[in-house]
């Protein structure tokens, strides 16, 4: 089981490699919600997302003989970019299984970091099956996007930094796809801010983690129709499910329209480019899915990798308030 000590060791490993991303605040947002909110800007992390933390930590932990075999993973975009850059920095070859409908901006960036991409049709194939066939051929080391101890520990450093920078919080809200970021940040919060309430946020149409959390039974979804492509994961993992159940206080869901409204706010008022998945926590606060009034609240903005033309199309779907 992953512990806060693993997170602390990951933080040492990432020092000078990953960005210590800034914490943004907004007087307008605070006044609107009647709270004091702190936004951890992982959209300003290397590769534009928190995923770099876990990817680098995991690949840096590989033994020399494992590095020689190369790395294999699967991802719709942010983990792909993160493992591609981490592999390049550490001199390791990498192959990435990506869906054919992955955002073009994320695929271009992944290729730019030197990764070999193997596309697949998510309507006909499971990425895990495609990756397993590749693994059997060349025996590369598989580093999945979230269900990996070193990945979880690396992601938890985002929460660790936030709490070190702003002090104890009453509430911490974290985006949830496969649960790696949520699990790791929850470990940090439990150690550094013991009375903090921890809530995960995911899309309404990709609510597998919420159903799993509330029932105690692992639920799955298949290619859910949400603009939050980073949260289209089929389920929580063997590691993240028990960590979420043990350390998280609640799970909530938000609509795609709510994500667009939250994106519009941070783009227009805070001048921050954040992708739909990246505003899952902020949308939960803005839509009243979590009680923030009168509280010190931490919100993780998990990533900013979005095609600009697509973002403008999204803004056209929902009228400005």
Image (cartoon, rainbow, N blue to C red):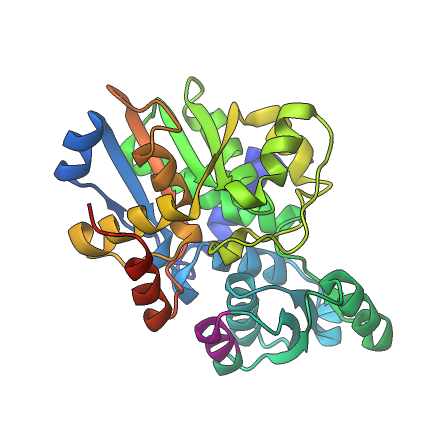
Residue sitting at 69 percent across and 40 percent down? 239
Circle count: 0
Is 193 positioned to the left or the right of 52 in the image? Answer: left
Q: Is residue 73 visible?
A: yes
Percent x, y of residue 31: 14, 30
Q: Quadrant of residue 197?
A: top left
Q: Is residue 8 visible?
A: no
Percent x, y of residue 130: 77, 69
Q: Quadrant of residue 48?
A: bottom left
Task: Tell me the quarter of the image containing the N terminus.
Answer: top right
Is 91 positioned to the left or the right of 302 in the image? Answer: right
Predominant SS of the magenta segment = helix
Nearer the observer, 178 or 115: 178
Residue sitting at 33 percent across and 34 percent down? 287
Q: Is residue 46 magenta?
A: no
Percent x, y of residue 252: 49, 31
Q: Which residues are magenta?
A: 103-110
Is 214 positioned to the left or the right of 21 in the image? Answer: right
């Amino acid at each position: 089981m992953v512990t806060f000590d693993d997170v602390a060791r990951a933080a040492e490993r990432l020092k000078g490699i990953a960005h210590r991303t800034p914490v943004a605040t907004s007087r307008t947002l605070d006044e609107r919600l009647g709270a004091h909110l702190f936004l951890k800007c992982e959209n300003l992390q290397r590769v534009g997302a928190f995923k770099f933390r876990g990817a680098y930590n995991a690949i840096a932990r590989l033994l020399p003989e494992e590095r020689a075999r190369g790395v294999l993973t699967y991802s719709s975009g942010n983990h792909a970019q993160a493992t591609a850059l981490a592999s390049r920095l550490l001199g390791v070859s990498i192959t990435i299984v990506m869906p054919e409908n992955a955002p073009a901006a994320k695929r271009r960036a992944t290729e730019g970091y030197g990764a070999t991409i193997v596309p697949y049709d998510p309507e006909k194939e499971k990425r895990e099956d495609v990756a397993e066939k590749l693994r059997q051929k060349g025996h590369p080391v598989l580093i999945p996007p979230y269900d990996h101890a070193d990945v979880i520990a690396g992601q938890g450093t985002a929460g660790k930094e936030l709490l070190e920078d702003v002090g104890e919080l009453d509430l911490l809200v974290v985006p949830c796809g496969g649960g790696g970021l949520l699990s790791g940040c929850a470990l940090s919060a439990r150690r550094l801010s013991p009375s903090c309430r921890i809530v995960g946020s995911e899309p309404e149409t990709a609510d597998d983690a919420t159903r799993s959390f509330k029932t105690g039974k692992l639920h799955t979804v298949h290619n859910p129709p949400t603009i939050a492509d980073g949260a289209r994961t089929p389920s929580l993992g063997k590691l993240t499910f028990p960590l979420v159940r043990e350390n998280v206080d609640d799970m909530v869901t938000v609509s795609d329209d709510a994500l667009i409204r939250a994106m519009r706010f941070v783009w227009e008022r805070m001048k921050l480019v954040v992708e739909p998945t990246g505003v899952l926590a902020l949308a939960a606060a803005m839509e009243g899915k979590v009680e923030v009034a009168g509280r010190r609240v931490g919100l993780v903005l998990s990533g900013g990798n979005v095609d600009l033309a697509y973002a403008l199309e999204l803004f056209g779907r929902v009228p400005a308030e």
